[in-house]
Image (cartoon, grey):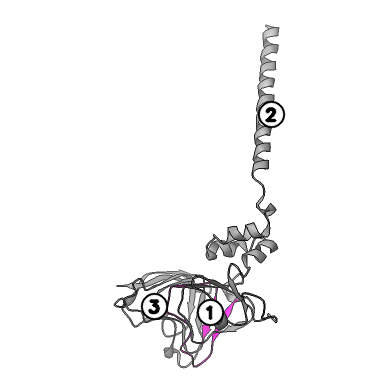
């Protein structure tokens, strides 16, 4: 009986040691076959980042570390607007938004540097672009529309705005003429003025009768402040699917402006 008990204990110990060896071998193979991504050179990482959507994926990669921020913000991936840049010969960097929009190719992403205020008055965007604020919050990147301008930005193509504050005194922050406009995580502000009835954060004049189908506006998690009304439509599109989140100091909106 004692001999049988000893044999069983030996078998159990051998089984445990065999399992631990298999586990160690498997772990060793896993660690060698999957090298950390940071071991890749800059060219490989940048090529990987180029497949990511600008918002939110590529934008989030810039928050990982200093190296990833440098690569994720490289001019090969998107253009930059930075008022503080002295050397204008640096590729992909522009002193103002209008210059960046003019130089951009369809499908480009423009990263607008945080800090300070960027002038934006009656800038027409006639090609598909994505404009992104470079700060952690939309308050960090502010576009100012000068008094007397119809709008800060005028959209005649499919575009996306994210993480930006657009402020105007009179007129409107954003003027949508045609295309599909997406506004994600922004702040649209009309400053207080005795002529508030002349200002509106978002205006759409798109018409479903126009040949270019698919005209619409989609707003996500965006603060809208001031003006006669949040949205003004003068075409065939109408406000739909409205949701409002009441925060302590602000209202956040989700809605669509689409065909009736």
Among numbered discs 1 and 2, the one appearing first in the sequence: 2
x, y (%) of residue 131?
53, 74
Which mark is first along the chain, 2 or 3?
2
Q: CA distance from mark 3 to mark 2?
A: 65 Å
* Residue occupied by mark 2: 21
Residue 233 lies in quadrant: bottom left
Identify whether 131 is placed above or below 37: below
- Residue 73 location (% of width, % of height): 62, 68
Quote the CA–CA distance across marks 1 and 3. Answer: 17 Å
| Location of residue 37 in the rendering, given as x and y in whole percent from the top left corner | 65, 52
Q: CA distance from mark 1 to mark 2?
A: 60 Å
Which mark is nearer the camera, 1 or 3?
Answer: 1
For the record, the magenta segment spans 141-168
**Tag 1 near tag 2, CB within 8 Å:** no
Element type where label 3 sits in the image? loop
Residue under the point 36% across and 79% down: 206
Give the SS element for disc 1: helix
As drawn, the label of residue 178 is 3
Corner quadrant of residue 77 = bottom right
Mark identifier at residue 101:
1
Q: Secondary structure at mark 2?
A: helix
Residue 193 lies, with reference to residue 103, above or below; the image says below
- Crowdedness near tag 3: few (<14), some (14–19) or many (≥20) residues, C-alpha within 10 Å: many
Q: Can you see residue 143?
A: no
Verify whether residue 96 appears in magenta: no
């Amino acid at each position: 009986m004692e001999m049988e008990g000893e044999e069983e204990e030996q078998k159990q110990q051998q089984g445990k040691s065999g399992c631990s060896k298999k586990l160690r071998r498997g772990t060793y193979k896993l660690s060698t076959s999957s090298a950390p991504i940071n071991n890749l050179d800059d060219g490989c990482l940048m090529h990987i980042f180029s497949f990511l959507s600008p918002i939110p994926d590529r934008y989030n990669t810039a928050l990982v570390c200093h190296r990833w921020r440098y690569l994720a913000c490289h001019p090969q991936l998107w253009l930059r607007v930075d008022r503080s840049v002295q050397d204008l010969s640096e590729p992909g960097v522009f002193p103002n938004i209008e210059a960046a929009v003019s130089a951009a190719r369809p499908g480009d992403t423009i990263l607008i540097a945080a800090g300070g205020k960027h002038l934006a008055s009656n800038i027409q965007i006639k090609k598909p672009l994505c404009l992104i604020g470079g700060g952690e919050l939309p308050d960090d990147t502010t576009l100012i529309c000068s008094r007397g301008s119809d709008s800060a930005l005028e959209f005649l193509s499919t575009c996306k705005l994210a993480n930006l504050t657009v402020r105007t005194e009179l007129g409107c922050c954003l003027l949508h003429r045609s295309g599909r406009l997406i506004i994600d995580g922004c702040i649209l502000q009309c400053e207080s003025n005795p002529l508030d009835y002349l200002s509106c954060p978002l205006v759409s004049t798109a018409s479903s009768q126009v040949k270019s189908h698919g005209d619409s506006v989609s707003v996500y998690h965006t603060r809208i402040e001031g003006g006669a009304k949040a949205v003004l439509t003068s075409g065939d599109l109408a406000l739909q699917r409205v949701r409002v989140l009441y925060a302590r100091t602000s209202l956040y909106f989700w809605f669509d402006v689409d065909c009736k």
